[in-house]
Amino acid sequence: MGYTLVVDDSATERAIITGCLQGVGINVSVAVSGEEALAKIQQDFPDLIILDVVLPGRSGFEICRELKGSDHTNKIPIILCSTKATEIDKFWGMKQGADAYILKPINQQEFVGKVKELIA
């Protein structure tokens, strides 16, 4: 069985998202930076990536663009998760190849629904 990779530098957000996913029986791995996420993905491809936009080092937008630009990782669904709520942020996130853009604080029902839809 695969897993979902949660990439967020906030321990609180990681705990909320991880708890939400584990509550519906999804295996979770976490990373606190884009670099750590890329290293984990090299070892084992996740079924889905939940990616914060604001990260130390490279932004979630950059990581998303890199993953979607590679033949090896472009099929992995990515949900960008951010407090950046403007239409331009959402537009820019989708332009980087994200499969969904969800605002924080997450609506857990909406979030789980989107996760299930993308890994079905």
Image (cartoon, rainbow, N blue to C red):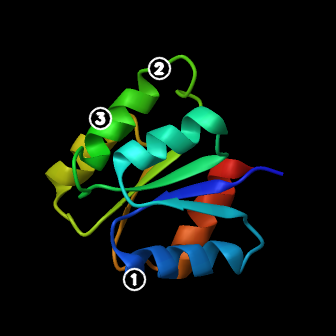
Q: Quadrant of residue 4?
A: bottom right
Q: Position of residue 104 (x, y in %)?
A: 33, 74
Q: Earlier in the sequence, mark 3 or mark 2?
A: 2
Amino acid type of disc 1?
Answer: Thr
Q: Quadrant of residue 11?
A: bottom left
| Farthest-out residue, top | 71
Q: Residues within 10 Å of mark 2 (few under 14, many from 20)?
A: few
User: What residue is at 63 percent from the left and 50 percent from the top?
Assistant: 118
User: What residue is at 64 percent from the left and 72 percent from the top?
Assistant: 21
Q: Name the residue beneath numbered marker 2.
A: 70
**Residue contact between numbered discs 3 and 1, judged by CB atoms under 8 Å:** no
Q: Position of residue 6 (x, y in %)?
A: 51, 60
**Residue contact between numbered discs 1 and 2, judged by CB atoms under 8 Å:** no
Q: Earlier in the sequence, mark 3 or mark 1?
A: 1
Q: Residues within 10 Å of mark 3 (few under 14, many from 20)?
A: few
Q: Which numbered dot is residue 12?
A: 1
Q: Name the residue beneath numbered marker 3.
A: 95
